[in-house]
Image: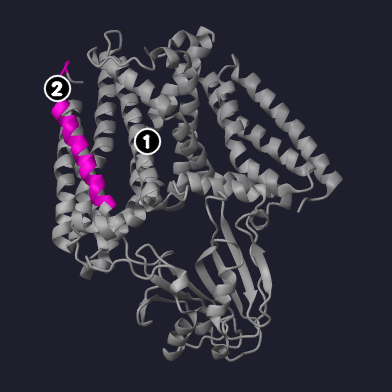
């Protein structure tokens, strides 16, 4: 590679990297915790009970009793669509759509209802329908939204896509620039040398180890955040109708006119469930719908998964007619076209949701992803430090130097203070009583974002990167150790109890103990080696 | 260690030409390439599925190549020429095969 090419790519690497530093750090840091979004929600709301292995599979639900319970509640079911699935708290959740009966009143046509189902006695508790997923807000949800800046709504989502695009650019130029040094310097780690070589070695070595992981996230991040470009540009073929493209890529069932009323009590929905369940080998329905309830066009729909060990993309769907007991539509979990795989693989890899390794194995997989994400955060931070150090030279004008330093203070303050504020938010979320659930979103957002802002301002004004580094790690370590204790005191979910029967809660506590120990260990090793910058 | 500035673009309008060509020009080439292919196949779905990720791979590769040009405007010219060819191929394809479904 010529000198010119090398320098051009090197400059591209620097510019694209520096410009997205903070954005990318937030994405990876929040994303690392988002891997455990559901466990965090369970951890945050959990109360200790002896029998936490409740009925949490669709197979154990008596669908006839569900319909019975809804009828005895006095809800007019005719023409509505019923959906039953388990949410992240392992509660069976029932959604009812408005009726398709056009002769009914406008209200019943629009009225959506949501209930949580007690799987012991089939009693129903009505819940608010707002929100895509329902359920109460949690810190996991906050971090999930922060992962693509969704606090800013759609512009935030597109911004995250743009950050991914520049990350892609930084990644590829990084590989090109460091390619020759990879084999030579891979085992070179010179911690006793001056600071810049330490960071350069760490940046290159860890960056190289992370390439496959980071490439996956750069590309899938673009696919998510900038996917809109694909659909809008291909709509050219359909005279600019984006909906046409969506129809081809994600075909939906057409709407059918509602049939006449029938007696809903005459159907045995459990038999339909059994039929759907046994349609393919090892098919586990996770989402059951009964469409057009109590009519001649009533259909039983089961969406679920086949054996993931047999097929990586294993979603399946079957629709049965309850009148004729015939299969109206089926998507086999074991046989799919190439185009179905593309999106499937995207989700599987991005969410670290594959392998079918069982409870322990799949959590271990997520922990590996978590560690890789934190390593990426580290590569981002070392990148900034190298950038700073390389510009801390005599030939750089004093004014420029001071500007660079101030940028460095700000970047590091924003990025590193995320760690203690996240730890503190876990404590805050656990202490927030459930009586405040209606204001939970506001309370968590205020605590997290205002706290983050205050810390950022404090560390920026302190103008000492060594100080920022040491005290963010120290406070995160100390607060992190308190997290399992607070959880134990508040809910009785002590580590030694949850390890036996409540894995998700255990994972969060254990994760924080490990993070804290790592932070405190790092603090104990921190020494001012050279003049802190 | 910062990149040696003697190899980097100094003039402002050249820099503008290169950055705009890298972002907009490269995108045009990448998207019209895929659309031209989509116009000539009978089953458009796999092409669009591939497009959903290869758009970014081709886009990024071209972005890098853009900065190797000495003259950013020439690069723009080249990208526009390639885009024109793909648009022509696309138009012929649509006319020849009728709109794919």
Does residue A444 appear in this view? no
Does residue B63 appear in this view? yes
Tell me residue A109's x, y (percent). 54, 81
Q: CA distance from mark 1 to mark 2?
A: 26 Å
**Location of the C terminus of chain B (image quadrant):** bottom right
Prevailing secondary structure class for the magenta stretch in the rendered image: helix
**Which residue is more in the foreground, A289 or A413?**
A289
Chain containing the residue with disc 1 = A
Q: Are marks 1 and 2 on the same chain?
A: yes
Q: Which residues are magenta?
A: A507-531
Task: Please give the count of numbered marks on the rendered protein.
Answer: 2
From the image, tell me which residue sits under label 1. A372
| Residue depicted at 37% across the width and 69% down the height | A91
Tell me residue A355's x, y (percent). 47, 47
**Location of the N terminus of chain B (image quadrant):** top left
Q: Mark 1 or mark 2: name the one nearer the start of the chain.
A: 1
């Amino acid at each position: 590679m010529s000198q010119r090419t090398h320098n051009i790519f090197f400059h591209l690497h620097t510019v694209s990297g520096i410009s997205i530093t903070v954005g990318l750090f937030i994405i990876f840091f929040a994303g690392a915790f988002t891997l455990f979004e559901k466990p965090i929600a369970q951890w945050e709301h959990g109360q200790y009970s002896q029998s936490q292995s409740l009925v949490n599979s669709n197979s154990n639900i008596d669908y006839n009793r569900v319909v019975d319970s809804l009828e005895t509640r006095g809800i007019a079911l005719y023409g509505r669509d019923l959906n039953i699935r388990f949410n992240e708290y392992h509660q069976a959740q029932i959604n009812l759509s408005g009726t398709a009966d056009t002769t009914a009143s406008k209200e019943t046509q629009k009225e959506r209802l949501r209930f949580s189902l007690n799987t012991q006695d089939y009693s129903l508790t009505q819940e608010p329908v707002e929100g895509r997923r329902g359920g109460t807000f949690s810190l996991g949800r906050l971090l999930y939204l922060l992962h693509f800046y969704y606090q800013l709504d759609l512009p935030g989502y597109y911004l995250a896509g743009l950050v991914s695009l520049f990350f892609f650019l930084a990644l590829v130029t990084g590989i090109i620039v460091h390619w020759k040094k990879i084999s030579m310097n891979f085992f070179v780690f010179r911690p006793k040398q001056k600071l810049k070589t330490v960071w350069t070695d760490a940046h290159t070595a860890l960056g190289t180890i992370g390439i496959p992981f980071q490439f996956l996230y750069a590309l899938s991040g673009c696919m998510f955040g900038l996917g809109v470009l694909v659909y809008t540009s291909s709509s050219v073929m359909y005279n600019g109708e984006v909906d046409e493209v969506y129809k081809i890529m994600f075909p939906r069932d057409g709407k059918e006119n509602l049939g006449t009323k029938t007696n809903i009590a005459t159907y045995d929905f459990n038999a339909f469930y059994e039929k759907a369940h046994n349609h393919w080998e090892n098919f586990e329905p996770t989402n059951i719908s009964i469409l057009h309830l109590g009519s001649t066009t009533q259909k039983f729909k089961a969406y679920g998964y086949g054996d993931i060990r047999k097929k990586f993309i294993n979603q399946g769907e079957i629709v049965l007619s309850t009148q004729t007991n015939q299969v109206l539509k089926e998507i086999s979990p074991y046989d799919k076209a190439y185009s179905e795989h593309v999106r499937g693989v995207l989700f599987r890899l991005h969410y670290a949701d594959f392998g079918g390794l069982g409870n322990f194995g799949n959590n271990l997989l997520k922990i590996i992803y978590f560690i890789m994400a934190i390593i990426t955060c580290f590569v981002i931070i070392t990148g900034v430090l190298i950038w700073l150090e390389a510009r801390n030279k005599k030939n750089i004008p004093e004014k420029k130097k001071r500007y660079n330093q101030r940028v460095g203070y700000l970047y590091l303050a924003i990025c590193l203070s995320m760690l203690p504020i996240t730890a503190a938010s876990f404590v805050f979320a656990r202490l927030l009583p459930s009586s405040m659930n209606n204001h939970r979103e506001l309370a968590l957002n205020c605590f997290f974002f205002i706290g983050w802002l205050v810390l950022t301002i404090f560390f920026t004004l302190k103008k000492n990167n060594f100080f920022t580094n040491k005290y963010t790690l120290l406070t995160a370590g100390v607060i992190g150790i308190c997290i399992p204790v607070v959880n134990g005191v508040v809910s009785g979910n002590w580590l030694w109890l949850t390890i036996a029967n409540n894995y998700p809660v255990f994972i969060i506590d254990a994760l924080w103990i490990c993070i804290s120990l790592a932070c405190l260990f790092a603090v104990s090793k921190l020494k001012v080696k050279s003049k802190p910058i | 260690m910062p990149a040696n500035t003697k190899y980097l673009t100094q003039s402002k309008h050249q820099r503008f030409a290169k950055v705009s060509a890298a972002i907009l020009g490269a995108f045009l080439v990448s998207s019209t390439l895929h659309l031209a292919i989509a116009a000539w196949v009978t089953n458009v779905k796999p092409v669009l599925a591939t497009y959903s990720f290869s758009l970014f791979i081709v886009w990024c590769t071209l972005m890098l190549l853009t900065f190797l040009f000495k003259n950013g405007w020439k690069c723009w010219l080249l990208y526009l020429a390639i885009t024109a060819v793909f648009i022509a191929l696309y138009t012929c394809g649509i006319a020849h095969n009728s709109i794919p479904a």
